[in-house]
Structures are given as structure tokens and as C-alpha cells.
Image (cartoon, rainbow, N blue to C red):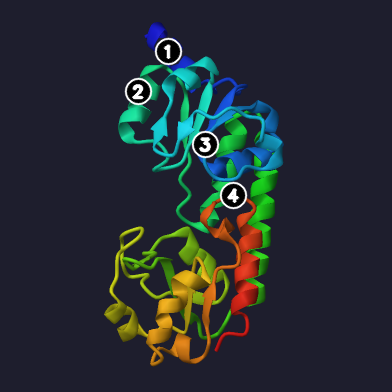
Amino acid sequence: MRTLLFVLCLLALPLPAAERVISLAPSLSEIMLDLDAADLLVGVLEGDERPAALAHLPTVGRYGQLEFERLLQLAPDLILIAPGSVPPAQQAQLQRFGIDLLIVQPQRLDQMGEAFVRIGQRIGRAEQGERLAAEFWADLEALRQRYRREQPLTVFYQIWHQPLYTIGGEQLIGDALQVCGARNLFEDLRQPAPQVSVEAVLARDPDVILGGSNAELSAWQAWPQLHAVRTGQVWAVPNKGLERPSRQMLGAIEQLCELMKAAR
């Protein structure tokens, strides 16, 4: 019995704070910066443009494909993972190496604060994580109050144009639309990024159409019967930060809300 109690006590002890961290998603690297923990990062994924503070860091592979030899040379004691950044088989291999993995998957904006707290606790910056979460929630609520509408706009959010992809329900971008007094046209679909038809968009007739660039959105001009086209409310998203769940997302949401403020 004493042996069992001793083992249970050991299991209950908190893990030591990580000192060498690899981030496998740009959003997680940004959260490390938000937590004033850039000094703990020893490696990142190759890909998107990095903040200047992380420009010197070595890469450990590309999105979906790790380079294990390089990663192990960096001797991390914690790897931050976003869903999809590492295939399940490679995650399992990392676990076999005995490296601590922290999978961060906020699916709603209100869960962002929890992500800050979890990472902060794991790297010995619990106070910073809690403060960052409180600031995020307060700023998010302020945006909701500033941009709320009695009658929400319906928005078709175009991820890609050929074929036509959008966002489904329970997505961070859908939450961002709600902050701006709008709702996702296809919020009833459960897939994260469902493929839809032009006919389906025509049938639902959104107030606003948003997409990555004006070039990708130009094809909608062939459908002047759409309210969004008729009123000139087909717009490129002003800030791609909507796709990276970190503190900077608040600024991206505010830009989006300002864009849609005058929408009819």
C-alpha cells in the first residue's frame, strides 16, 4: 500500500518546467513570444514568414514532414504541436523517443485563454499565461460589444475557389465572424473545411463574401443575382492572422470587423 501511495504521489507531481522547446506551428511560436519565452525556443518548422525574434532558429522540417535527426540534435524537452502539423505516425515516433508533447487545439475563441495558461504552466511562465489569458478574454469581449448587430450578417467565407471550399461549424474563423456581428453561411456543416457548390451558395444568398484575395473572388461577378455581388460586398480578408490562433488574432478580428462595419 505504501509503495502504491508513493507512486501515486510521484504521478501527481508537476512536470519540471521545459527549458528547450520546439514549436511545430507558427501560431504556437507566436504564443511563446506572447509569453516572453522566445529564449526557450530552440527550433521551429520551415514555412511561413517568421517574426524577427525567431529568424535565427534552426528548422526541423516542413509542415507534415519532420526531420528527426535534426530535431533530436536540438535535444528538446518539450514539443508544441498543433493538430495537422505532424502526422499521427510521427507523433507516435516522438513519444517513443520519450519527448514530452503538448498538443494545443483551441476550437473556439473562448478556449484561446486556456491555451495560453497550459503552455505558460508547462514552460514555467504560469503567471504570464494567466495574465495573457485574462487580457485576451477582456479584449475579445470588448470587440463583441463594439461590433454586435441586432440582425447578424450572413457571410460566405471562401477558403479556396477551385474547387470551392469554405469553413464548417465550430471553427475559430466562424467565432471571429460572430464577434463582428455575422454568422458563417455554412455553420450547419460539421466538417472543418467542407467543399460546397456554387449552387449551394446561390441558394443561401449571403450578405457578404470573404476570401483570400480579390483574384480568387473575381469569379463571383458572374452571379450578379447574389446580394453580396449586387451590393459590392465581396471582399478580400484584410489580415491572414485569422488563420493563426494566437494573441495577434485579436488585431486580425478587429480589422475584419472594421471592413464589415458598413455592410448592408
Report the residue at 40% width, 17% height from top: 97
- Residue 28 drawn above or below residue 148: above
- Residue density around tag 1, few if under 14, some if 14–19, many if 20 or more, within 10 Å: few
Query: Gap in Å between the C-alphas at discs 3 and 4?
Result: 18 Å
Secondary structure found at label 3: loop
| Residue linked to disc 2 | 93
Counting from the top left corner in percent of width and height, residue 153 is at 49, 82
Query: Gap in Å between the C-alphas at discs 1 and 4?
Result: 37 Å
The residue under label 3 is which amino acid type?
A: Glu
The residue under label 1 is which amino acid type?
A: Val
User: In front: mark 3 or mark 2?
Assistant: 3
Report the residue at 44% width, 39% height from top: 63
| Residue linked to disc 3 | 46
Q: Earlier in the sequence, mark 1 or mark 4?
A: 1
Report the residue at 44% width, 90% height from top: 227
Counting from the top left corner in percent of width and height, residue 22 is at 55, 29
Query: Gap in Å between the C-alphas at discs 3 and 2?
Result: 20 Å
- Residue density around tag 3, few if under 14, some if 14–19, many if 20 or more, within 10 Å: some
Counting from the top left corner in percent of width and height, residue 164 is at 34, 68
